[in-house]
Amino acid sequence: MRASILIGAVAYGLIKYFAGGVCRCSTRLDDLVVVITGGNSGIGEALAFEIAKKGATIVLACRNVEKGGNTKLEILKSVKNYTGKIYVKHLDLCSIQSIVNFSEQLKSEFNEIFALVNCAGVFYHPQSLTQDGFEITLQTNYLGPFILTHHLLPLLQKSVHARIVNVASEAHRNVNVYDLKAVTQCQSEFRSHFVAYGVSKLALILFTKELAKKLSNTNILVNAVNPGNVETPIYRYFPPLSNPWLYALQWPIRIVVVKNPFQGCQTLLHALLTSNRSTGQYYSDCKLSLPSPIAGNDKIASEYYDLTLQIVAKYFNTESEC
Ligand SMILES: NC(=O)c1ccc[n+]([C@@H]2O[C@H](COP(=O)([O-])OP(=O)(O)OC[C@H]3O[C@@H](n4cnc5c(N)ncnc54)[C@H](OP(=O)(O)O)[C@@H]3O)[C@@H](O)[C@H]2O)c1
């Protein structure tokens, strides 16, 4: 009897520990527009539910608009007294034309937006090139958000206060500057899917740092967040988790150490709502945290921003937007 109480108490303590931080901000988002990429699944979908409770008008930017429509219906059904609106719009980050079309549509329908949450992403995706000729994980997780963000800056600049939240990952710590250049310049010798993912997240944190510097005299705060390890469909390509037998073996441990999407969206929510006006920072478990030394390096951030511009400059005019 005593042993089972002890085991229960230890399991409860561990579950609480691994659930991570909880956003305690009471800020409301009534009449404010929040754009969430990947808002139809996992962490982005959980965030959409949470900000609906705060009254936000939400744009679900989805590759699969049918799934986005289901998310919209679920939110409308479950969030009581919701006063905002939900728009479901098509966005494929693997197509620069789609990013441009999506941005133009938003500019024609909204006068301003309060926040852009760059949440969409892929992990361990089979290696291939997008129709634009970039490595697929890099374009989905970094180059696409980079272009989208610049396209939406004019709408963000019209809001009295605005925020950009870039969803990163602790995986950024596993790569180095050599990997960063190899993947970005699409050199075939980069080592694995996992390296491509780590690079995309390192790139996003460096972008966050440099963009925050460029926007320091504006109304816009830009931060990166680490959601933690979260149970979502993102692991669909990852052999140890996509195999049902291997997954079943890990399940007893995963229910203790892996967050659910509600827990996983807390740091994103915090970055949107906090009264702390830090910018260019990295949040983890609803607190400011330090990224890797490479991700925190101003010179690398500045040089990498310029390298990215060289690669994608032809798709937009940054001079007028940043
Ligand atoms: N889960 C974790 O443990 C974890 C840990 C650290 C960081 N993250 C980050 O958290 C973010 C959200 O991931 P998640 O875990 O919530 O995974 P998820 O449930 O698979 O959600 C990813 C979302 O991104 C969308 N997406 C993928 N490719 C896209 C494209 N080309 N264009 C537009 N949308 C696209 C997906 O759309 P479809 O529904 O059409 O596939 C989906 O809505 C990602 O940036 C991920 O890297 C997750």
Image: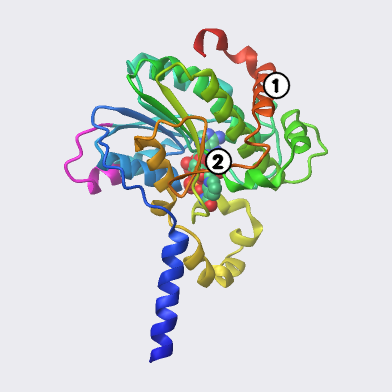
Q: Find residue 26 and report its horizontal and vertical position in percent.
A: 26, 42
> Can you say whether 208 is above or below 172 in the image?
above
Q: Quadrant of residue 199?
A: top right
Q: Which amino acid does label 2 sit on?
A: Ala
Q: Which residue lies furthest to the bottom in this view?
A: 1
Q: Does ligand 1 reach within 8 Å of label 2's beta carbon?
A: yes
Task: Looking at this view, name the residue that lies furthest to the left.
Answer: 81
Is 101 or 227 nearer to us in this picture? 227
Residue sitting at 67 percent across and 19 percent down? 306
Q: Which of 145 and 20 is in front in this view?
A: 20
Q: In which quarter of the image is the N terminus?
A: bottom left
Label 1 neighbour load within 10 Å: few <14, some 14-19, many 20+ = some
Residue numbers of the magenta segment: 73-85
Going from N to C along the chain, the mark reached first, 2 or 1, is 2
Q: Which residue lies furthest to the right in this view?
A: 189
**Residue bearing mark 2:** 168
Is residue 285 rendered to the left or right of residue 22? Answer: right
Question: Is residue 211 toward the left or the right of residue 157 in the image?
Answer: right
In the rendering, at what x and y percent does residue 286 appear? 43, 46
Name the residue rendered at 36%, 15% in the picture: 158
Callout 1 secondary element: helix
Residue sitting nearer the eye, 57 or 96 = 57
Question: What amino acid is found at the position of numbered circle 1 in the picture?
Answer: Leu
Which residue does the image show at 42% across and 23% down from the upper left? 220
| Coloration mode | rainbow
Instruction: Check residue 305 for magenta coloring.
Output: no
Residue 14 appears in the picture as rendered: yes
Residue identified by numbered label 1: 307
Q: Where is residue 214 in the image (x, y as percent from the top left)?
A: 54, 18
